[in-house]
Image (tube, grey):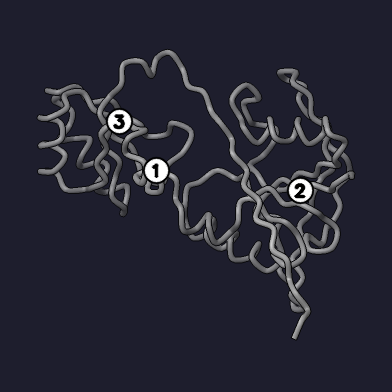
Amino acid sequence: MTLRVAVQMDPIETININGDSSFALMLAAQARGHRVYHYDVNALTLDANDRLTAVAHPVTVQRVAGDHFTKGDPVRLDLGRDIDVVLMRQDPPFHMGYITATHLLERIEHETLVVNNPASVRNAPEKLFVMNFPQLMPPTLITRDKAEIEAFRAQHGDVVMKPLYGNGGAAVFKLSARDPNFGSLYDLFAVTFREPWVIQKFLPKVVEGDKRIILIFISIYTVSNDT
């Protein structure tokens, strides 16, 4: 069965094809014969008839650096009627624009499979959700309290400090146990971010790179017409 897959993601022109999981999903969909479209979250429109549309481009992708995609002519798609699957893949930051996109995609859930479920995306921000699995991660603190961070550093030595809703390695800092820059960095974070921050024990093996496992769970509900 050929599916029409719309990928809501950041500009495809600027992605790193060696590390972008959305690109890997597009390659896999294409290899299975599915039709793939790309659109930016800013292309979403909800009209007066409660129809959610997006101006999208049909795309063909290949793992060739500098020549990794070909775009077709733009087309306005009704995401509830013209598309079988929407992959919500744009990167954070997790701001109100991101939240609004989840509300918009909820409008088509009864017509189109949206992955991940928009409500679940809102309710499971990744750096908070992962706190449910402390045995699988380094010691971690979620706070903006300076005394708590200093106590954590005293206990664990070298730490990593990063925004709670950041992505792509942006604003991630390593602090040594006696780093003299901590006070200045704390002040910078305090005026830049309204939310708590993530403080983690530094793991030296991070320099060896990472591996990612992508799990896609699909719930199938049977609706009975019995009265």
Direction from residue 188 to residue 44 in the image, left or right? right
Question: In the picture provided, is 201 more to the left or to the right than 11?
Answer: left
Comparing labels 2 and 3, the label whose residue is closer to the camera: 3
Q: Quadrant of the N terminus?
A: top right
Which kind of residue does numbered mark 3 sit on? Pro
Q: CA distance from mark 1 to mark 2?
A: 28 Å
Classify mark 2: helix, strand or loop: strand
Residue 90 placement: quadrant: top right
Q: In the rendered structure, which disc, 1 or 2, sits on the residue that comes first in sequence?
A: 2
Q: Which residue is mark 3?
A: 138
User: Residue type at mark 1?
Assistant: Val
Report which residue position mark 2 lands on: 6
Q: Residues within 10 Å of mark 3 (few under 14, many from 20)?
A: few
The residue indicated by pointer 1 is: 130
Residue 163 versus residue 216: which sits nearer the camera?
A: 216
Above or below — where is 166 with respect to 105?
above
Between marks 2 and 3, how big is the CA–CA gap? 36 Å
The residue that appears at 79% across and 49% down in the rendered structure is 56
* Whole-percent x, y for residue 204 in the image: 31, 16
| Tag 1 and tag 2, C-beta contact below 8 Å | no
Q: What's the residue type where badge 2 is placed?
A: Ala
